[in-house]
Amino acid sequence: MSYLPADPSRPRGTDAVDWSATFARRTSSFGDELTAILSLAGAADVITFSGGFPAPEVFPTDALRQLLPRLAGADAAVALQYSPTEGLPAARAAVSAQLERSQGVGVDPADVLITSGGIEGLQLLARTLLDPGDRVLVEAPTYLGAITAFTGFEATVDGVEMDEQGLRLDALEAALGHGRPPKLLYVIPDHQNPTGRTLPPERRRGLVELCRRYGVLIVEDVAYRELGFDGHALPSLWSLAPDGVLQLGTFSKIFMPGVRLGWAVGPDAVVSAMTSAKQNSDQCAGALGQMLMAEFLDGGHLTANLVKARALYRARAEAMTDALERYMPDGVTWLRPRGGFFVWLTAPAHIDTRALVAPATQLGVAYVPGRPFYTVERGGNELRLAFSGVEPVAIDEGIRRLAELLSPGRTSA
């Protein structure tokens, strides 16, 4: 192979081509928000309320020390090899058993798809169902990774209003009955990201009935379902209507994000099509992570680890809400979460939380402003605070700094 000599007239270290002009129109700027959140994961000089990172204190290191040597030894031929696209039989069986224990619905392991995290499940779903211009309904606000996934396939994404109990059924019915019929409704019914709200049982049943009547697929994200502080979980939407709900789950929050693993269960035709789409994505989730997850679940380690995780996250949520009550100026409101990782904060209408991101970083505190969680220009005075990965002493200091930033004297300048 030969190469042309460098052009001496071209300045070194410059690029004459504007490659951004070649980007596909579906390229979304929402990804920048996710990149910014993840970039702070290891920051030592910033109190990071931005990312929904699990607490390292609940990582199952003792169990891993037992499991890894065997998987790297006698089971290496499976654990260190490629896996089937749909997942290893042991991993699919472990997920099936866990779903029956936690949600009371039996599913054949052959009907479980193992994904590389929850976000890949969303990408596979979008690749499978969405053509340019298709309509998708989401909660307003909702997980910004879902907005990115759907808009990345050029869908029209419409937000449905919420109240303190989650998605409003009257707003959903209005959205279903107006405009182009939606392909799907994406919802996080338990300890929602970003608001922390949980949909009550009567709304869950009403939501399922409405979508069944209009022939709309429900996509249920259960990332935080197992992290209710009291250990009590409401019926999942999938358990109410397995034929009309595609459930997407992740092990990042309840096992560890170091292995990117999740699952999809639901209507056979949809899961089968997502499996085919995965063949043109990463082809398969990592086998070592799948074996670790299967051994972790089958050995009963998850149950004990969840008890520890719930207690830790409850203490951190209380530290945050106590600090908010202690430091925040009048006019700032929030909801006290009952599970999950987040507190959703609303400041007075004149405050622009996006404009305050840089000043907050200078004070050594980070959060996510509210706008990226909406599909329209909303949320300018809102923000998301994640308490999950921050110790209580740092939570108190971080909220004190944030309150200083939101005080009338600072924000009027």
Image (tube, grey):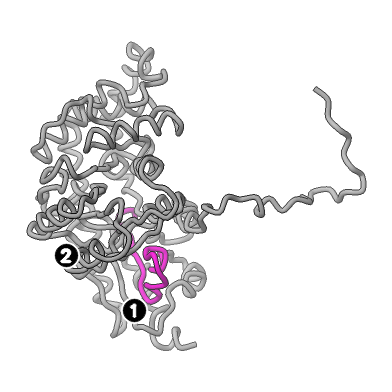
Direction from residue 392 to residue 276 in the image, left or right: right
Q: Position of residue 21 (x, y in %)?
A: 66, 54
Q: Position of residue 204 (x, y in %)?
A: 13, 55
Is residue 220 at least partly visible in the picture? no
Amino acid type of the residue that numbered disc 1 sits on in the rendered structure: Ala
Task: Give the answer, above or below, for where 28 lies relative to 267.
Answer: below
Q: Which residue is mark 1?
A: 347
Q: Which mark is residue 18?
A: none
> Disc 2 residue type?
Leu
Residue 370 falls inside the magenta stretch: yes
Q: Quadrant of residue 205?
A: bottom left
Q: Seen in the image, is 12 located left or right of residue 161? A: right
Q: Is residue 62 visible?
A: yes
Q: Is residue 251 magenta?
A: no
Q: Residue at point 15% right, 48% down?
A: 237
Count of numbered badges drawn on the protein: 2
Q: For the residue labelled by badge 1, is the local secondary structure a helix, a strand or a loop?
A: loop
Task: Pick the residue in front: 378 or 177.
Answer: 177
Mark earlier in primary sequence (2, 1): 2
Residue 147 left/right relative to 21: left
Q: Which residue is mark 2?
A: 169
User: Where does the image place residue 42, in percent across and percent down from the top left?
Assistant: 46, 50
- 2 or 1: mark nearer the eye: 2
Report how far apart the C-alphas of labels 2 and 1 lie in the structure: 26 Å
Disc 2 on helix, strand or loop? helix
Q: Quadrant of residue 286?
A: top left
Choose top left, top right, bottom left or bottom right for residue 102.
top left
Mark 2 neighbour class, 10 Å CA radius: few under 14, some 14 to 19, many 20 or more: some
Q: Which residues are magenta?
A: 368-391
Q: Residue sitting at 24 percent across and 25 percent down?
A: 295
Q: Report the quarter where the N terminus lies.
A: top right
